[in-house]
Amino acid sequence: MRFYFLILLSGVFSSLWAAPIENGIPAKEALKRLKEGNQRFVEERVIRPNQTYERMMRVSEGQHPFASILSCSDSRVLPEMLFDQGLGDLFVVRIVGNVADTDEIGSLEYGTGHLGSQLIVVLGHSKCGAVTAVANGSSMGGHIPALVDNIIPAVKKARGEGIKEEGLIDRAIELNAFQGIEDILIRSKEIRHLVFHKKVTLVAAVYDVSTGRVKWMGEHPEQSRLLKFFEAEMRIPKIAEGSQSSEAPEKKVSQAPLTSREPVKAEGSLNEEKP
């Protein structure tokens, strides 16, 4: 009798572990959690949620992160720590300069379309070496120029705003976070559809490595105009299943009302001429 009871009890626990966790909470609630977590981090009263063995066992059966974060690979920028979150809470994509290129965008499509995150945060940070290198025209070799060429439009925009040299890098860091959103919306049909139909929210933010505080900048200031450019496409109720294209046609990208990227040489200076 005891043997059969243990089998039954084992089945109950197995079903509990397999139960879904935190299925897609609304973006507004997700953002609130991140803001509250960062506030705890800044005030040194972290609670370190969801960092237990029990939580590890639970999420081993499946993940449902409540937010997706595109952040820099900088060793000082750890989203789970600075937002005071734990296992299975955040779907984090890290890349130098928090740029949004093919691999990063594909990862975010997975985080939203498959895992159910309704919030995407493009997180820049102060004293970013990648943005600084582009702004200063530092000479780089190897694959680095092709990696950071996404940052060039942000530096150009900062200079176009007439920002003085001492504030240029800080402003370029902010604009680079918005550039990440712009690149995502232009290149990802899947995420465009989710944003257009208000199923996903994209916001930019900048983390200060000296204070620990995150500055929230909100949605891209030109998001409505960008989505309007693709409005005809957005009216299609569902993307054809099996489609391999997640990028807008080249003609559309070149005609988009926002900044397009320029080709970058494999090696050499990344310095851009000032206006």
Image (cartoon, helix red, strand yellow):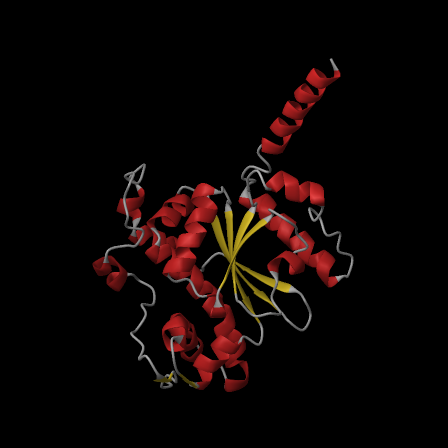
Q: Is residue 240 visible?
A: yes
In the depicted structure, whether residue 274 falls above or below residue 224 = below
**Residue 50: image location, x then y, percent:** 69, 46
**Which residue is most to the left?**
251
What residue is at 60 percent from the left and 59 percent from the top?
79
**Which residue is most to the right?**
45
In the depicted structure, whether residue 196 falls above or below residue 131 = above
Of the 4 image quadrants, the one containing the N terminus is: top right
User: Viewed as shown, does residue 170 lie left or right of 140?
Assistant: right
User: Viewed as shown, does residue 172 lie left or right of 41?
Assistant: left
Q: Quadrant of residue 262?
A: bottom left
In the depicted structure, whether residue 118 falls above or below residue 130 = above
Q: Foreground residue, 183 or 222?
A: 183
**Residue 229: image location, x then y, percent:** 30, 54
**Which residue is most to the top?**
1
What residue is at 48 percent from the left and 65 percent from the top?
95
Q: Is residue 153 visible?
A: no
**Count of numbered labels shown in the rendering:** 0
Q: Quadrant of residue 45?
A: bottom right
**Residue 156: image location, x then y, percent:** 39, 77
Q: Foreground residue, 90 or 237?
A: 90
Q: Foreground residue, 84 or 43?
A: 84
Of the 4 image quadrants, the one containing the C terminus is: bottom left
In the depicted structure, whether residue 39 falls above or below residue 260 = above
